[in-house]
Image: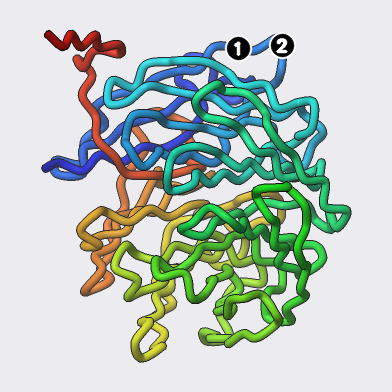
Amino acid sequence: MTDYAFFTGYSADIGFSGGLAVDVWDLTSITRVGQATAPLFSGVLQSPGALRINHAGTKLYVTNGVPGSSTAGLLGVFDLPSLTWNTWIDLSAYCTGAAGIVIDASDTYAYVTGYTSGSVTQVDLASNTIVGNCATGVIGGGFTGVTIDAAGVNAYVVDPGGGNIVQIDTSTMTVVTSVSFFGLGNGTAIDIEPAGGNLWASGFLQITLPLTGASNFYSGPATESLYPGAVKVNHAGTKTYLITDYTSSQFWAIDLSTFAVTGPITLPGTSGVGFNFGPTDIAVTPSDGRAIVSLNFAAYQFSVIDATTYAVTNYPSPQTGQSYFGADIGNYSPSAPTNQIVMML
């Protein structure tokens, strides 16, 4: 079965003036096979953010909110596998600077972080409506990364400005606890091991659950960035992948049986001070054979990393000035019907 990589970026026809698109790449032939563009929404500036495909593989969700600003939060919905536009979900009543997103295992709810609102908004995916919101009161640098346990009971978000991990009860959308971690630094991402025993934050930090403050710090050499970026635990729960952005544009892997750290592995990127220079997100193929990394303001659009040898292959942009932000892997069929009617006789 062919794996397809999906990336959020600026639409080719609108460019940086405010247009959101999703590009699709065939990971067997490494060719771009499609692009779908989101329509404008009531004059709100559009900026590609995080991208997540639901577990059923039927919907693709993109956050929009220009992180770092007070832009109204939106959640865009595309139908899969056809990648056709479905709708905008307006989160602006609670969320500004929509950034991170996680979907629970049952595909019932999505949780979207507000970078400037310091909020986590709960969205019912059947009705596309807001059903809960948590205004945490510990905004710091704004919430970005978010993950959820397998039971859908607790969500965990990163407060990079305060160096905190915040636990939220999803049934009440209230804060259970907020714990500060020295090793978190300016980390902006978080993921949970499949078995649910530990969290991984992008500051090379393994955090033990329940969230009491117990953690282990697995540092790379001194070349690691001061601004750690995305983190992803593979499907088997045997490796954690981390990337750094802004200053070093590097990739790391931690073996979860030996905790050996592999890296730094150089990725293309642009050094600078600002939001999301260099690598921005990670996705792992279902077989755990490869990782893909989206790239922003880089000479290439994305990198593919062999999970055994850690060999890196970079793939160029098919259009001038394109950048990729969110990344995920799923199925694609442009001729697939968007609506199906099933008759049972």
Q: Which mark is residue 221?
A: none
CA distance separating discs 1 and 2? 7 Å
Q: Quadrant of the N terminus?
A: top left
In this view, the residue farthest toward the right is: 137
Q: Badge 2: few (under 14), some or many (20 or more) residues near its Cα, within 10 Å? A: few
Residue at left 31%, top 35%? 57
The residue lying toward the viewer, choosing from 243 and 201, is 201
Q: Are marks 1 and 2 in contact (CB under 8 Å)?
A: yes
Q: Quadrant of the C terminus?
A: top left
Expressed as whole percent of the image width and height from the top left, the position of residue 56 reads 32, 37
The residue lying toward the viewer, choosing from 269 and 71, is 71
Residue 185 relative to residue 80: left or right: right
Residue type at the position of mark 1 = Leu
Q: Is residue 11 above or below residue 177?
A: above
> What is the count of numbered marks?
2
Expressed as whole percent of the image width and height from the top left, the position of residue 92 reads 76, 26
Residue type at the position of mark 2 = Gly
In this view, the residue farthest toward the front is: 345
Mark 2 lies on a secondary structure that is loop
Query: Which residue was labeled with disc 1?
Result: 40
Expressed as whole percent of the image width and height from the top left, the position of residue 136 reads 82, 52
Q: Is residue 291 above or below residue 36?
A: below
The residue lying toward the viewer, choosing from 299 and 324, is 324
Expressed as whole percent of the image width and height from the top left, the position of residue 125 reads 52, 29
Q: Badge 1: few (under 14), some or many (20 or more) residues near its Cα, within 10 Å? A: few
Give the image quarter of residue 124: top right
Residue at left 36%, top 42%? 55
Q: Which mark is residue 43?
A: 2
